[in-house]
Image: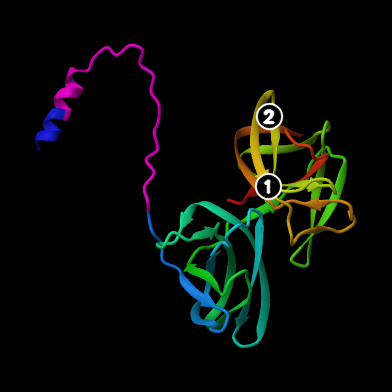
Amino acid sequence: MINLVMALCIFSQLQDIEPYKEWEVEIVTKKSEEYLLLTKNHPMTFSVEGPTYLRVYTRIFWPEGNLGSEIYKVILQENKIDEEIITLESEKSKVTEDKRGRALSKWRTFYIEVPEGLNDYKLTHWSAPGDTILVKFAYESPKRWSEIAATEYGTIIEAVEEEKILKYYELEKGASITVGVNGPVRLRVISRLNYDEKMIGDQNYSISVEDNGAVEKFALKCYKSQIITYKDEKNVVPSNARSFHINLREGKHNLRFSLAGTVAESAALRFLIEEK
């Protein structure tokens, strides 16, 4: 009570502050989360009542000394019939560790679309740097995104991702890609830096977006992907996917994308808008 009175008194005495420049401060607090342990010799079984979506969050214990990326795989079996191998690629988290201080990877997730009725699932540790994969479940639906086409571009590159062919627009250094969008809408841009034979390790790059004269720059950091390849580009390896979002106001927007801040000769972009 005394502290409250003192605070009110101080506030009432503060007047005519010059210069009055405000700065927003974000308070960062520690929080803990519980994960389940999926080990190599003990598959995890569970049942889910559908129809619904189940989101599966995963992490791995990070191998000491590894400065790059790691791949790990799980097998998802549905109703003892359908089986799918899910490949995940991650890097070391800079902000998360377990209660013993052990380093962890950044979380990676996948969704299970659960059909109507009671469904039985089995999740199996297929491969990982260690014996354990950390798993957490949440009832979350994936956001719906629709792919949109660029209006001005040079070349289309086809990437092989989990046995699917996805089309990217090649963004060469010194060139640009233009996308026309009507707002209000939220635009998601997925980018991959193109590694040539001489490029190794983590790389920095930036994507500049010009919107009717206003320019915004997105700084990104990436590493060479171990699981994604280009279909017809044997001398170029894509990086892991890095994405950013742009909230566009009402009206017509002509967005011009360009590449800078990198030794790479090009990147690859995809464009999606959030469905309402």
Quadrant of residue 164 in the image?
Answer: bottom right
Q: Residue at x 58, y 51 (%)?
A: 276
Q: Residues within 10 Å of mark 2 (few under 14, many from 20)?
A: some
Determine whether 188 is above or below 39 in the image.
Answer: above
- Whether the magenta-drawn stretch holds residue 147 is answered as no
Determine whether 148 is above or below 183 in the image.
Answer: below
Instruction: Please say if the residues under marks 1 and 2 sit with CB atoms less than 8 Å apart.
Output: no
Tell me how far mark 1 sits from mark 2, CA to CA: 25 Å
Label 1 or label 2, whichever comes before in sequence order: 2
Determine whether 78 is above or below 60 in the image.
Answer: below
Is residue 5 toward the left or the right of residue 35 in the image? left
Question: Which residues lie in the magenta part?
Answer: 7-30
Q: Where is residue 144 shown, x and y percent of the image? A: 61, 56
Q: Read off the residue under disc 2.
A: 211
Is residue 197 toward the left or the right of residue 54 in the image? right
Q: Main secondary structure of the magenta part?
A: loop
Q: Residue furthest bottom?
A: 80
Residue 103's disc number: none
Going by the numbered disc 1, the residue's amino acid type is Cys
Q: Read off the residue under disc 1.
A: 222
Quadrant of residue 129 in the image?
Answer: bottom right
Q: Where is residue 83 shown, x and y percent of the image? A: 67, 81
- Whether the magenta-drawn stretch holds residue 17 is answered as yes
Q: Residue at x 63, y 53 (%)?
A: 67
Q: Where is residue 3 shown, x and y percent of the image? A: 13, 34
Going by the numbered disc 2, the residue's amino acid type is Asp
Q: Residue at x 14, y 34 (%)?
A: 4
* Colouring mode (rainbow / by chain / secondary structure / one colour): rainbow
Determine whether 38 is above or below 60 in the image.
Answer: below
Q: Where is residue 48 shown, x and y percent of the image? A: 49, 78
Residue in front for this viewpoint, 13 or 37: 37
